[in-house]
């Protein structure tokens, strides 16, 4: 693995963690559908991270699909620049759903 791949992974991880913290904040601050979609996004993100840790592609597929759907709805419900944060979760969900964390060179 090259240094560039490692740095890209770190940058993506920082974005996903930031979006996850935003989802947690929205669970505490928002009301209605926005709260619930961020709650689902938070749970799906944590499930995806657990699936990577446990090296479980089927669990990653399920978590990725749930994350893509919930983050897409959360992004649609958000306002202004905060719509960008669920996009990072969608990218992570797509990576999980395609099995990218388990791909071998």
Image (cartoon, helix red, strand yellow):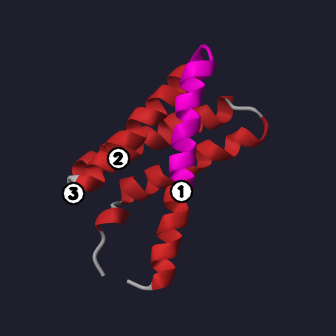
Marking on residue 39: none
Q: Quadrant of the C terminus?
A: bottom left
- Vertically, is 4 above or below 43? below
Mark 1 Cα within 10 Å, few/some/many (few <14, many 20+)? few
Which residue is denoted by mark 2 in the rendering? Answer: 48
Mark 2 or mark 1, earlier in chain: 1
Residue 18 position within the rendered picture, expressed as x and y whole percent measured from the top left: 57, 47
Which residue is denoted by mark 3 in the rendering? Answer: 55
In space, the residues marked 1 and 3 are separated at their CA atoms by 21 Å
- Is 52 magenta? The answer is no
Q: Secondary structure at mark 2?
A: helix
Mark 2 or mark 3, earlier in chain: 2
Q: Is residue 3 left or right of residue 28?
A: left
Q: Secondary structure at mark 3?
A: loop
Mark 3 Cα within 10 Å, few/some/many (few <14, many 20+)? few
Residue 38 position within the rendered picture, expressed as x and y whole percent measured from the top left: 53, 29
């Amino acid at each position: 693995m090259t240094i560039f791949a490692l740095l890209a992974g770190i940058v993506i991880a920082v974005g996903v963690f930031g979006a996850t913290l935003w989802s947690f904040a929205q669970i505490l601050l928002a009301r209605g559908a926005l709260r619930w979609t961020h709650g689902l996004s938070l749970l799906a993100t944590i499930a995806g991270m657990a699936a990577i840790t446990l090296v479980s592609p089927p669990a990653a597929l399920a978590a990725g699909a749930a994350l893509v759907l919930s983050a897409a709805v959360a992004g649609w419900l958000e306002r202004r620049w905060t719509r960008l944060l669920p996009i990072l979760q969608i990218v992570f969900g797509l990576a999980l759903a395609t099995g990218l964390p388990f791909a071998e060179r």
